[in-house]
Image (cartoon, coloured by chain):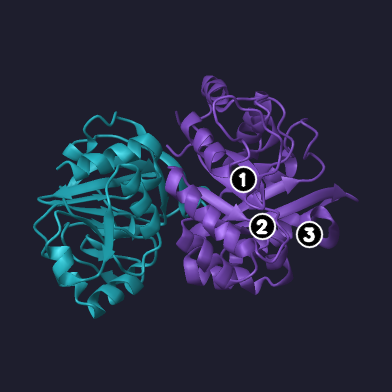
Amino acid sequence: MLTKRIIPCLDIKDGRTVKGINFENIRDAGDPVELGALYASQGADELVFLDITATNERRKTLAELVTNIARHVNIPFTVGGGISSVEDVYVLLQSGADKISVNTSAFKDPALVDRLAREFGSQCIVLAIDTRFEDGDWYVYLNGGRVKTDVKAFDWAKEAVGRGAGEILLTSMNNDGTKKGFALDITGQLAQHLNVPVIASGGAGTMEHFTDVFENAQADAALAASIFHYKEIEIPALKTFLYNKGVNVRF
Amino acid sequence: MKTVIIKYNAGNIRSVQFALERLGVNGTVTDDHEEIMSADKVIFPGVGEASTAMQYLKERKLDAVIAGLKQPVLGICLGMQLLCKYSEENDTKCLGVFDVDVKRFQSPVENLLKIPQIGWNNITGLHSVVFEHVPENSYMYFVHSYYAALGADTVAITNYVINYSAALQKDNFYAVQFHPEKSAVAGARIIENFLNL
């Protein structure tokens, strides 16, 4: 039976992980390769690396980093952040990434999703959506949540799946950072009405939050960052907890 | 020992090469007939679309080379599907090493089955030397929309609404639908077992 996935997310700037992390069992917590390998050994099902570097040199640095990750990490990983062309994706996949994620660039040019899916296959194209609930609905936000649009998250997700997106990574801005749980309603709406996997993101604070998003919102995967980085929740304990709750997870 | 990875328009060659590297083995990526035929072990990787891949192999006459190999061959994902008889993916005649057809997943009810299957699923009914020290119900990483049906050559089974071949074996040909190169320790063990044949 296909399992629910637990996905730690690492923010990368200039080739280093951004959030302050304290791990005694690795030498350099700022090294994305070492941290990624640690999570893999602990039972993470996948990893997401989000590059937030803004400089012009970023492409080359990122490709080198991706090669290093692929060399040392024995589970699948997605790379996102500033990807806006077939060429960008080609370089990252050739470097060893399993999937890439697109966000603002795809919203501004939806045909990009068609081009990427045709060129590389839907299975490696993840559409990331940042969304906020206001005035009675969930709306798409761009540029890392700074720019509001008047398009509803569900409508954009549906369109993107039609164009060939193979997975949706949905981040609720209302929930992100609150540690009060995932946005169950919009996650559930997407997971139940789209025929691609939905990765829930934003709001994880307790192990029960993961049970909720898998059982009540039918999310296919759940992503979190700080609770893993600060060891508030450790992956082996989380997997055991979920297993005992009857959630199908991989050990 | 010389291990080659067949070079063609497939997506996961780099990952396979790195997986070998983690086991201390150097994998040569090549489409040279002589080099492939003289290798001790041949890995036939694959992420992509069946008809395009077959076309590519035919243009370089790699189809006959692969089907005629006598040393241990490991097909992965699309590599496994291409070793079958026929694929529904764009109505493609494949290499015919395994007497099995490749079909597309069908959702019994709309949206019940997400296609492609992406993620970790368990493998059962393991009976091949490549699964030595791999426990029943081990989880492997799958990404695919098409599957090989069950048949006489099935050596591992996975369920995604229906039971299908997670692995096939016939003579010197071994093939897995999942990605051992991305399946953590259990996947590495399968590659290692293959290299030790």
How far is mark 2 from mark 1, CA to CA? 17 Å
Q: Earlier in the sequence, mark 3 or mark 2?
A: 2
The quadrant the C terminus of chain B occupies is: top left
On the question of residue A68 being in view, the answer is yes
Q: Amino acid at mark 3?
A: Asn
Residue with the mark numbered 1:
A199
* Mark 3 or 1, closer to the camera: 3
Residue with the mark numbered 3:
A143
On the question of residue A192 being in view, the answer is no
* Mark 2 or 1, closer to the camera: 2
State the hue of chain B.
cyan
* Label 3 element class: helix
Q: Chain of mark 3?
A: A
Same chain for marks 2 and 1?
yes
Q: Residues within 10 Å of mark 3 (few under 14, many from 20)?
A: few
Closer to us: A223 or A248: A223
Q: Chain of mark 1?
A: A
